Amino acid sequence: MALIELVDISKSFDGELVLDEFNLKIKENEFITLLGPSGCGKTTTLRILGGFETPDTGKVLFQGEDITNLAPNKRPLNTVFQKYALFPHMNIAENIAFGLKISGKSKEYINDKIKYALKLVNLSGFEKRSVDSLSGGQQQRIAIARAIVNEPRVLLLDEPLGALDLKLRQEMQYELIRLKNELGITFLYVTHDQEEALTMSDKVVVMNQGYIQQMGTPEEIYNEPENAFVADFIGDSNIIDGVMLEDRVVKICGSVFPCIDEGFGRNKPVDVVIRPEDIIIGKPGQGIMDGVVTSNVFIGVHYEMCIEAGGFEWLAQNTTSYPVGTRVSIGVTPENIQIMHKPQSEDEEAISLDD
Amino acid sequence: MMKKSGRARAAAVGKGLYLALILIFLYLPIFTLMVLSFNEGKTMSRWTGFSLRWYEEMFASRTIMDALGNTLTIAFWAATIATIVGLLACIGMNAMKDRSRLVLMGINNIPLLNADIVTGISIMMTFIVCGISLNYGTVLFSHITFCIPYVILSVMPKFKQLESHTYEAALDLGASPLYAFFKVVMPDIMPGVMSGFLLSFTMSVDDFVITHFTRGAGINTLSTLIYSQVKVGIRPTLYALSTVIFVLVLVILIVVNILSNRKEGEK
Ligand SMILES: Nc1ncnc2c1ncn2[C@@H]1O[C@H](COP(=O)(O)OP(=O)(O)OP(=O)(O)O)[C@@H](O)[C@H]1O
Ligand SMILES: [Mg+2]
């Protein structure tokens, strides 16, 4: 059984629909990430779970029990707020101890926990500091510490690493995953950083405009995006109009590519996704179509090139550099071509998924 | 060179003179009154020697002491009750949508701009129409009424400045709404609450017009007592009394300033 379940949640603010029939199941000890552009309703989803917003329709279930109208302080979950929300007139230790004091823990236990949590977020010795004297990134880490010391069943994290630099962020990502495994806490994590989502999660939920676009493991999301939005949002992609001539054959930019997808019918217009690293660059005539390199940038590890071929600007990544102006051929192995239905209407752009 | 520094000195002297004049205008009358309150004789025109005679007479006088007692208890209870009611109003208004809150703030500001005499007469009329006889209670009630807007005016900005979502964070960590309010919200809005209380207290001590209309017979506060004695001729005891009131208000003001400065200093 799912630990937490959102059933048909809809929510609008001032007549503006923010969540539309939103469904989500979270299993015990799962790390789920909500990923989506700014304003797509991620924070709103967390606030409904935390009990700070009441959905217009739908239910929130915890272990099958309806908690839609349960007060926030009665819910077995803790939140790391997007805006930290530390208590400004308390020092760092008092901030972290807040939840523990309420649950009536002993002084020694609380002191141990404060030490442990500060060490975890790399801020040992900060007990007596005031909130104001901390940088944004430090405050964010204290917010994490304040939530995890309570060892809640579920931890809701709203872009908890947004204010940290890359190195610290990676360290904290690692610590959070370790925490999840050690304490058996279920994580619902919000981010708009696709890389973070892919590295940390068991399951990624890609959202746009209050709809779930796709739900799946990081591999599924990355390798088999179900629509153009997901493909575009997760990493750089070539998203091209194509026509499915028959099973396993797709026509792109006037050339015919073999692929492995079936069941789209004959002569059906489709969206085709090809990752830049999957494009094979060769000598003219060796690939499926020929083109000219129009730009070339070194981005660390490999070169990112644009190749004009068949009237489309292909984004390609390769460890070998081909100077601008070189005539090259491009090809793709059949399994690296991802075919998607074209959305018929706005509504169909949102794919509703059951589990 | 010389000329320039000369002109600068003249400017400095001018500024000093100007400031001194303003201060004299502001404080000379009060100073005169204070000095005269220590004058031995009854006359205003001649200094006949230092004495605490008028203070003794003041403290010995039943009427004056009753009036002082009334003034202080009314001010204290009016300020306390107005602070509680005003604070509750702010909590409610803070949770409202922007538009309703703006409308309510507008309504709140009207009594502040209203002339005291209009407020006083209308409150008196209301009491009379409702058949309530004027006494201590009606004065207290009117004072509470006119103090509430001041409390709201000084507390509401503090709610606006509240760190976003700290209240929700406290609930999230398991605090009951009441505990969260006292532990997390209250410390942040306390300076506003304190200044609302002290403002109410001074406004209440200060008030004459509204008290005059709502006090009925037999009840006097300091201001109404002084007024009634003006008619029969002022005795120097009233200078002593005015000095006491002035010092009282001064002390409160200093306390407020120190409190708010200390709060600033902590930040
Ligand atoms: N209390 C509110 N009143 C009115 N509109 C709101 C309120 N809260 C959220 N919204 C609107 O709902 C939409 C979704 O907001 P939400 O905060 O859930 O976005 P988000 O996905 O968390 O974005 P971000 O990545 O920028 O944090 C936005 O258009 C926002 O303006
Ligand atoms: Mg958000």
Image: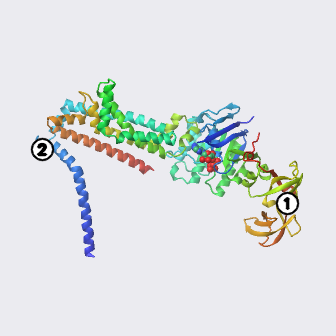
| Crowdedness near tag 1: few (<14), some (14–19) or many (≥20) residues, C-alpha within 10 Å | some
Q: What label sits on residue B44 in the rendered view?
A: 2
Give the image location of residue A195, x and y in percent: 71, 54
- Residue at 42% x, 43% y is B191
Give the image location of residue A188, x and y in percent: 68, 43
Q: What label sits on residue A287 in the rendered view?
A: none
Q: Would you place residue A213 above or below residue A308 in this image?
A: above
- Residue at 55% x, 54% y is A135
Marks 2 and 1: in contact by CB < 8 Å?
no
Q: Is residue A352 left or right of residue B177?
A: right
- Look at mark 1 in the image and give the residue it sits on: A332
Give the image location of residue A106, x and y in percent: 57, 36
| Numbered circles on residues, count | 2
Q: Chain of mark 1?
A: A
On whether disc 1 and disc 2 are found on a single subunit, the reply is no
Q: Chain of mark 2?
A: B
Q: From the viewer's side, name the closer residue of A35 and B116.
A: B116
Q: From the viewer's side, name the closer residue of B129 and A74.
A: B129
